[in-house]
Image (cartoon, rainbow, N blue to C red):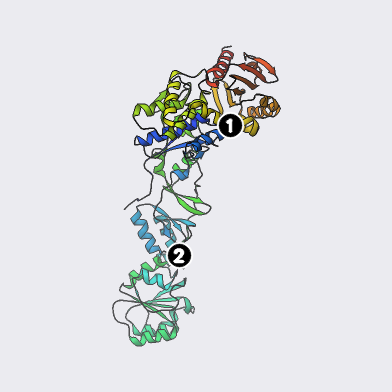
Amino acid sequence: MKNSVSRVIEPQIFVCGHRNPDIDSIAGAVALAELRRRQGFNNVTALCPGILPDRAAYLLQRFNVPFPPSRNDVYVRVRDILSQVPLIKSGCTLFDAVKTLRESGFARLPVVDDEGKFLGMLSGMALLANLLNIGNDAGSGLTGRRIRSSIKLIAQVLDAEILTVRDDEVPQTFEVYVAAMSPDVFDEHLPDNNHELAMIVGNRPDIHLKSIARKLRLMIITGNRPVDPWVLEGAKNEGVSIIQTKLDSATVIRRLKFSVPVEFSDFPEETLLLSPRDRMTEIKHRVLNHAEDVIPVLDEGKLAGVVLKRAFNAEPPFQMILVDHNEPEQSLPGVAELPVIEVVDHHRIGMNPTAQPIKFTGDVVGSSCTLIASMFRASGESLTPDMAGVLLGGIISDTLQLKSPTTAQLDRRMAEWLEKVSGVSGETLMNELLQIDSALAAKSPEEVIGNDRKDYVDGKYRFALAQVEESDLELLHERHDELIAVIKQTIKNDQLDFFGLLVTDAVRENSELLACGKPEILGSLPYDKLGDELYALPGVLSRKKQLLPQVLAITASLQRW
């Protein structure tokens, strides 16, 4: 079959929440992936962006749901578009290599050794140049005398029968002559290196005897005439190898060049070698402007596959379903290169325009899991108790056990239904989750501000808001200085204008805000100061509904002046 390559045609669909995931985004992605698989979508996989949070891990483990695989980005890399083409193995003759090349339909193919180490690329043009240089003795051209091969390979290429042999598998250099001379001048035409001489001769017993007397390395007898037994006996005694072929001398001369093992070819230097880890966007220009259509991909010197130019005209190998977010800044790096085919979210709309219409499920509710539970119910797909428990965990964590001002009636209805299906009460599940070590008690300052961080852009302002849930706000006061130091460094590293860490006590329905940034933003915050960079936010439980709108109002006002 021509141009036969191994390609994954159907794209992989990733279902993924926002960076620095919380329970709602993880639970929602896992449940939505399960719903789409039941509805006939193939190759659907839920992802965890980065490290799985402890409380999300507890929730999934409690309900016997496998952890989603973690990824730090969804960039399309060379390993995702690899093709497998026919390989030319070391030890293969050029004769067989040409056949493989011709049958493949490709202009060139990779050559590898038995361990998969890449040796070079063989093409018709390179092969022609190689043949013109092999045995570059004066006036030889394509019929140059010297070749590097073995008796076994020569016999294979010439379809010859081995009559007598010595060390037939040992590769060596042969100097080839055709017995067109008379016996009396035979010795005058041959050099003294008998151990390298290969003589092409027809039905000429006189030359046979001369060759045996000289103890030549190899005699190639053409034609179908039987070889005299006393010639064979003499050859055995003198250690002369004899092979016989039905081919004529002219054909033998042409084919001998193709008995050379492919690894002895002079491969042209490769000007473009790729790694499986290279990003497509970074190598696209180089590949498309390269002279060749088949580009080798190496992993620690071994061939991993090839990249074909036509892969850049194909659809991306990944598609995305976004859960609990839709803004590019909150997605895994690389999302901008992929088609987004669906969004399930309960936040503001800040996504980029899409090239094609997509399915968008959004509503003013407190949790993305509420929307996904509604989708299960509306579709008629059965919901297992375990998956119902996971969705319930997402709802009660994102709505702070239905106490957050973001909580809608639909959140309450879905939570009540999920309690019945799972056999677990939301209150019990919330208490279990709160028993997991708090971030402020057990995490590094980098993890505290990063594990549930969301980034936003409003005009010229870039800012981030993080949130943690605690039952004891005194922990925030104890760690104030180290948290502020890390926040200030993060602002510098990420070129932010403002960073706010909202620490929420859901039981007492109270929050405090640790904030750093530009003075004009800090000076506009409508909250009472408790100390340096620390603000009191009584009654504030929701980052999305209460804190974010306030910060956006400040940035919008500042940009009007």
SS at mark 1 in the image: helix
Q: Position of residue 404 (x, y in %)?
A: 53, 19
Q: Residues within 10 Å of mark 2 (few under 14, many from 20)?
A: many
Residue 144 lies in what quarter of the image? bottom left
Q: Looking at this view, is 265 or 307 the one in front?
A: 307
Q: Residues within 10 Å of mark 1 (few under 14, many from 20)?
A: few
For the C terminus, the quadrant is top right
Give the vertical position of 315 relative to 326 (above or below): below
Among numbered discs 1 and 2, the one appearing first in the sequence: 2
Residue occupying image coordinates x 33% and y 56%: 103
Q: Position of residue 335 (x, y in %)?
A: 47, 33
Give the vertical position of 176 relative to 209 (above or below): above
Q: Looking at this view, is 342 or 242 the one in front?
A: 342
Q: Looking at this view, is 377 or 33 the one in front?
A: 377
For the residues labelled 1 and 2, say whether their Cβ atoms are less than 8 Å apart.
Answer: no
- CA gap between label 1 and label 2 equals 77 Å
Residue tagged 1: 435
Q: Position of residue 152 (x, y in %)?
A: 40, 72
- Looking at the rendered structure, which numbered label has been put on residue 561? none
SS at mark 2 in the image: loop
Residue tagged 2: 134
In the rendered image, the residue lying farthest to the left is 224
In the rendered image, the residue lying farthest to the bottom is 230
Q: Amino acid at mark 2?
A: Ile
Q: Is 124 placed left or right of 285 in the picture?
A: left
Q: Amino acid at mark 1?
A: Gln
Residue 329 visible, this orientation:
no
Residue 317 lies in what quarter of the image? top left
Residue 239 visible, this orientation:
yes
Q: Position of residue 276 (x, y in %)?
A: 49, 46
